Amino acid sequence: AIVGHANLLLGDRVEPVLEALQAASPNRFRGIRHSVTWDAHPEVENTAAHNMQGQLANETFRAGARVLARMGMTLEGWMFFPQLPELADFAKAVPDLTIILNHIGGLVREGPYANRDDEVLATWRSGIAAVAECPNVVIKLGGMGMPRNGFDWHTRDTPIGSEELAEAMA
């Protein structure tokens, strides 16, 4: 499958972009990836091309998402863990859209979130629980070795096993 990108802030006007992507790869194109990472702390790198707070609540963004849903395409989204409640609200507002939550829900344990494991993990777990209530959201278990997650798995010579992963996430 191929996952591309289109700017959902185009709203309804995103349709011709999606049609062009579909035409370029009619048998493989499945949807788009759109980063909505945002954090008020400047130490947390916001990688979203459209660095703005509240993208998931933006009505124009939601209109673009409804076009995706109508066309049977998926949305892969990356956000930071404090945004998970926003994702739950978004998923409920666009229930026909299949959403893939990337990078285990955007766990961040660096900058202002460093050395606050209990608080950060409790907030992350609460957000994951809210998202889990949305049948149109699945989670992608990728990006777990990113340094920002705070597990230091990226420094190891061998990858972690499933039991260690389950224990870290519990």
Image (spheres, helix red, strand yellow):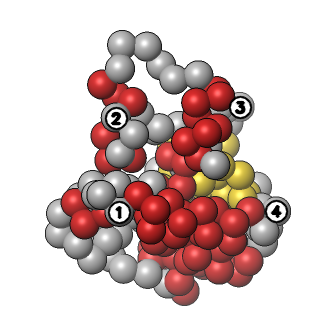
Rounded to the nearest angstrom, the CA distance separating label 1 from label 2 is 15 Å
**Closer to the N terminus: mark 4 or mark 1?**
1
Query: Foreground residue, 30 or 83?
Result: 83
Q: Residue at x 69, y 71 (%)?
A: 130
Amino acid type, residue under disc 2 in the picture: Asp
Residues packed near mark 2 inside 10 Å, few (<14), some (14 to 19) or many (20 plus): few
Image disc number at residue 135:
4
Above or below, 69 relative to 166: below
Q: Residue at x 64, y 49 (%)?
A: 170
Rounded to the nearest angstrom, the CA distance separating label 3 from label 1 is 46 Å
Q: Which residue is mark 1?
A: 116
Rounded to the nearest angstrom, the CA distance separating label 3 from label 2 is 39 Å
Q: Position of residue 123 (x, y in %)?
A: 52, 69
Residues packed near mark 3 inside 10 Å, few (<14), some (14 to 19) or many (20 plus): few
Rounded to the nearest angstrom, the CA distance separating label 2 from label 4 is 32 Å
Question: Total marks drawn?
Answer: 4
Is the residue under label 2 in contact with that under label 3 (CB below 8 Å)? no
**Closer to the N terminus: mark 4 or mark 3?**
3
Rounded to the nearest angstrom, the CA distance separating label 4 from label 1 is 31 Å
Amino acid type, residue under disc 3 in the picture: Asn
Query: Foreground residue, 40 or 96?
Result: 40
Q: Position of residue 136 (x, y in %)?
A: 77, 61
Q: Which residue is mark 2?
A: 152
Amino acid type, residue under disc 4 in the picture: Pro
Q: Residue at x 73, y 77 (%)?
A: 92
**Closer to the N terminus: mark 1 or mark 2?**
1
Above or below, 151 relative to 117: above
Above or below, 93 relative to 74: below
